[in-house]
């Protein structure tokens, strides 16, 4: 036994030592991460944008008249959010409270190119910047509000790739002019009465504008004969003479802020008129009119989000409510007039679900309260219609509850009722109520409706609604 | 006249035991037959109830979890800006690590054509944390969602995740239809 132990075990220390040495060597040399690699840009095979920015587009080159335009209406909804930028129909025409009183008959409908462009109405005529998929053209189409008959169209050929819809904006109409912005930033100004082309601007080519994801959503502004556009790129904002196309003023853009889907909203605070805009990079107030026109009055770079669709809501006391979807949430500003100098103060900033916010539609301010549809990322409150007191913006006066959700719901306030369109083409009638949510009635008006996100328009009691393919007209008069 | 033979006590006990054994054998066989032919049940997640709390990743008895993300391609928008792939506040819409929401880079993004991208789940890397499903539901169509993968699940008598699920999204479903994929059924239980 002793011999056996001596024979075999005497080498044991050497074996253990060599084994230990090998183990340490393996431990030092073994790399458990060899199977892993870094995540680097370009792994998706994307080889760069096929930009069409250099392409010369003959804006407004084509015109066709179907029949002489006959105006039969009195009222107008002349631009995005209506005449007063508040999304409220101020006429006191009694409108239906529920669908037993009417509103279910489709007076006329028209098939459109895929998109979310909303109509404007001016004295009996409907103006829409459609995208004609067959002709591959941004097409300004004019219809009779009463019959839906197309009166004339003006268009230009431009290639738009399908990207969750193509058209997105609402034209601006005045007595003399029609102003449009196409998906790729082509601004077109047309004589309203004759349809003649007045001028065009290619924001991408002429102002180095960066067209936002899913194309341009900024609705143009016509203000006292001046076309006000926010290109981003070389200029944060420009004022263009609507009659001639001459550039009247431009706002420098030293910080390289970009165009958003948000639209410019005029606002007068303590006698100072300004254009309020929510750009990708920050919020800004630009002097409107007078010798100061085009001067930056204030800016808030803290309001910086990649996807901004809702427009600023300006309250009479100088507060400005800013909101965005995709995780951004909202911000409440207070403007202060200090001896003629406007200074903004950030009152509150909060995430979605912690207060009023919106992904796409701009809230409505009425009777000292804000009404809106919450975004999908508002957690338990997602897609609910809510009422909020601006003084306590991080809480709700009421919500529509978990059984009443409304997608990305465009809505209008008319005759003290909210008319709210769900994604699937269902129109809901909700009482304007500062104490509780009260749904009056609902009716699906667009068969197989899908992505009904375009802003609504109403005039002479007729309401225009659309989903991504079809626009319909209904009569809401009682 | 032959007198009727009476059973002894021993014979009675033996025959009773024989009868009892045959009866129990038949019972066991019957139960075995019934068990072998009756419908089996497995655990599954109702994606319309799921609230993306992340407990599927941490409460499964398996590590990594038997819950994985799946993709309903017919619902997907093939977005460039994918809320399930990109972290909120991303610096660029690219595959760089700092832009990815998934903690294990389990989602593969592939350029199809301007402006569309396809997103595939690498099941080996997925830990079922639901971050992508939450992002997709918050900003997109909700095509990314969680399912219990039955080639991994050990089908515990009492599922540890089901016990921890705050929204009662996990329940037993018939093994003949073990998945509740979005696109195959609707939130009210109807078939698409």
Image (cartoon, coloured by chain):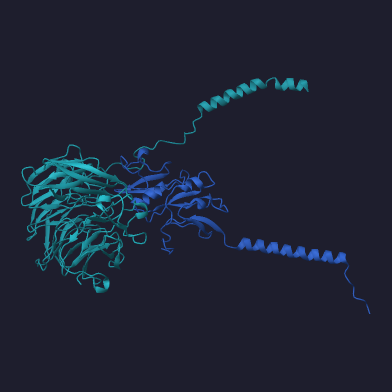
Chain colours: A cyan, B blue
Q: Is residue B159 above or below residue B30?
A: above
- Judge from the rendering whether residue A267 lies leftward or rightward of residue A113; answer left or right: left
The residue at the point 20 percent across, 45 percent down is A334
The residue at the point 28 percent across, 41 percent down is A48
Residue A286 placement (x, y as % from top left):
14, 44
Q: Observer-nearest residue: A24 or A265? A: A265
Residue A53 placement (x, y as % from top left):
19, 45
Q: Observer-nearest residue: A33 or A299? A: A299
Q: Is residue B78 above or below residue A415?
A: above
Q: Is residue A144 above or below residue A409?
A: below
Residue lying at the far bottom in this picture: please name it: B1
- Residue A62 occupies quadrant: bottom left
Residue B88 placement (x, y as % from top left):
33, 44
Q: Is residue A52 visible?
A: no
Residue lying at the far right in this picture: please name it: B1
The residue at the point 37 percent across, 38 percent down is B97
- Residue A99 occupies quadrant: bottom left
- Judge from the rendering whether residue A223 lies leftward or rightward of residue A136; answer left or right: left
- Judge from the rendering whether residue A440 lies leftward or rightward of residue B148; answer left or right: left
Residue A314 placement (x, y as % from top left):
19, 50
Q: Is residue A118 visible?
A: yes
Image quarter where the N terminus of chain A lies is: top right
Q: How many marks?
A: 0
Q: Observer-nearest residue: B118 or A92? A: A92
Image quarter where the C terminus of chain A lies is: bottom left
Q: Is residue A20 above or below residue A357?
A: above
């Amino acid at each position: 036994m002793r011999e056996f132990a001596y024979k075999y075990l005497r080498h044991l220390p050497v074996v253990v030592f060599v084994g230990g040495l090998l183990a340490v060597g393996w431990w030092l040399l073994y790399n458990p991460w060899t199977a892993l690699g870094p995540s680097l840009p370009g792994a998706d095979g994307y080889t760069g944008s096929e930009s069409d920015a250099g392409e010369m587009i003959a804006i407004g080159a084509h015109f066709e008249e179907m029949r002489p335009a006959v105006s039969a209406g009195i009222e107008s909804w002349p631009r995005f959010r209506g005449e007063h930028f508040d999304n409220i129909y101020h006429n006191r025409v009694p409108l239906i409270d529920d669908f037993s009183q009417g509103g279910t008959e489709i007076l006329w409908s028209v098939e459109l190119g895929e998109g979310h462009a909303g109509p404007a109405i001016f004295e009996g005529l409907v103006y829409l910047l459609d995208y004609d998929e067959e002709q591959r053209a941004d097409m300004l189409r004019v219809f009779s509000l009463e019959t839906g008959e197309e009166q004339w169209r003006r268009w230009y050929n431009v290639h738009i790739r399908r990207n969750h819809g193509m058209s997105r904006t609402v034209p601006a109409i005045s007595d003399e002019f029609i102003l449009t912005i196409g998906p790729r930033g082509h601004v077109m100004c047309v004589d309203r009465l004759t349809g003649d082309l007045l001028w065009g601007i290619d924001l991408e080519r002429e102002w180095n504008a960066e067209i936002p994801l899913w194309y341009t959503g900024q609705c143009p502004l016509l203000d006292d004969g001046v076309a006000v556009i926010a290109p981003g790129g070389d200029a944060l904002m420009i004022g263009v003479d609507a009659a001639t196309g001459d550039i009247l003023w431009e706002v420098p853009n030293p910080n390289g802020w970009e165009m958003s889907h948000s639209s410019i909203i005029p606002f007068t605070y303590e006698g100072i008129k300004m254009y309020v805009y929510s750009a990708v990079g920050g919020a800004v107030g630009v002097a409107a009119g007078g010798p100061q026109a085009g001067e930056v009055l204030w800016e808030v770079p803290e309001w910086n989000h990649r996807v901004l669709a809702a427009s600023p809501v300006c309250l009479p006391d100088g507060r400005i409510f800013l909101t965005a979807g995709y995780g951004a949430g909202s911000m409440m500003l207070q403007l202060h007039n200090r001896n003629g100098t406007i200074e903004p103060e950030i009152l509150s900033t909060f995430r979605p679900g912690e207060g009023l916010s919106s992904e796409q539609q701009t809230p409505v301010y009425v009777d000292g309260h804000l009404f809106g549809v919450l975004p999908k990322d508002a957690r338990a409150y997602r897609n609910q219609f809510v009422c909020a007191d601006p003084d306590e913006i991080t809480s709700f006066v009421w919500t529509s509850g978990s059984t009443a959700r409304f997608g990305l719901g465009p809505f209008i306030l008319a005759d003290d009722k909210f008319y709210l369109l769900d994604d699937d083409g269902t129109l809901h009638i909700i009482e304007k109520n500062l104490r509780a949510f009260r749904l009056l009635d609902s009716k699906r008006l667009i068969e197989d409706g899908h992505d009904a996100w375009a802003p609504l328009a109403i005039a002479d009691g007729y309401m225009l609604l659309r989903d991504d393919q079809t626009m319909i007209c209904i009569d809401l008069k009682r | 006249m032959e007198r009727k033979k009476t059973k002894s006590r021993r014979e009675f006990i033996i025959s009773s035991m024989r009868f009892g054994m045959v009866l129990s054998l038949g019972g066991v066989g019957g139960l075995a037959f019934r068990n072998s032919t009756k419908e089996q049940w497995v655990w599954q997640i109702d994606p319309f109830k799921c609230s993306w709390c992340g407990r599927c990743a941490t409460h499964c008895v398996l590590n990594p979890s038997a819950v994985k993300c799946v993709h309903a391609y017919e619902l997907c928008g093939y977005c460039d800006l994918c809320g399930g792939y990109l972290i909120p506040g991303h610096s660029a819409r690219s595959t760089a690590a700092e832009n990815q929401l998934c903690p294990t880079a389990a989602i593969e993004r592939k350029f199809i054509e301007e402006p569309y991208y396809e997103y595939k789940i690498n099941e080996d890397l997925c830990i079922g944390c639901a971050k992508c499903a939450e992002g997709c539901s918050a900003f997109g169509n909700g095509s990314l969602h969680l399912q219990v993968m039955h080639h991994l699940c050990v089908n515990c008598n009492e599922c540890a995740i089901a016990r921890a699920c705050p929204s009662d999204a996990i329940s037993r479903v018939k093994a003949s239809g073990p998945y509740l994929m979005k696109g195959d059924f609707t939130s009210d239980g109807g078939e698409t």
